[in-house]
Amino acid sequence: MVAGAYLPKQSLIGPVLFPSYKLTLKIAGLCYCIPWLLVWIGFLIFDPSRLGAPSVSSLLHSLVRCGRRFGRSCGAVTFVFAIFDRAAMREKLLRDWEPRKLPKVRIAQQKRRRDAIAGIVFGVFGLIWLLQCQISPFLFLDQER
């Protein structure tokens, strides 16, 4: 951890919060996937008509939906831990900041043209997707039509 403080920030969640992050992901997985699986098996055993005819495609469809929702919960946990990590780093930087210790200013390298083009292309695709979500909310909310 001491040596890592001298390296540039390369990880989304630092080594201080990473063990808690892993534990939280495991808890989220256990608290989400296990109950979902038990309820699904209960419906399959006690009320198979509710799930429709049991088939491989319906099983795969259900597993994909569970995976998507679990992925979203993992993304939310990651987002929250990344914010906590950045807030802790910012607090440390503000507390230990001294102008005399600042490094000399370097001339920034110019961005490459392909980076700018890629940013424009992905920005346009993202904007189109967001506009399409207003028309078809199932693209964002993962609901069937």
Image (cartoon, rainbow, N blue to C red):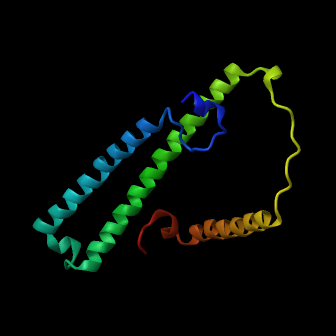
| Rendered residue at 65%/66% (across/down) | 126
- The answer to which quarter of the image holds residue 12 is top right
**Direction from residue 127 to residue 142 in the image, left or right:** left
Classify 20 as above or below 67. Answer: above
- The answer to which quarter of the image holds residue 41 is bottom left
| Rendered residue at 81%/30% (across/down) | 103
Residue closer to the observer: 14 or 120: 14
x and y, in percent, of residue 4 in the image: 59, 34
x and y, in percent, of residue 2 in the image: 57, 27
- The answer to which quarter of the image holds residue 71 is bottom left
Residue closer to the observer: 108 or 134: 108
Q: Residue furthest front?
A: 3
| Rendered residue at 58%/67% (across/down) | 134
**Direction from residue 72 to residue 88 in the image, left or right:** right
| Rendered residue at 71%/64% (across/down) | 123
Quarter of the picture holding the N terminus: top right
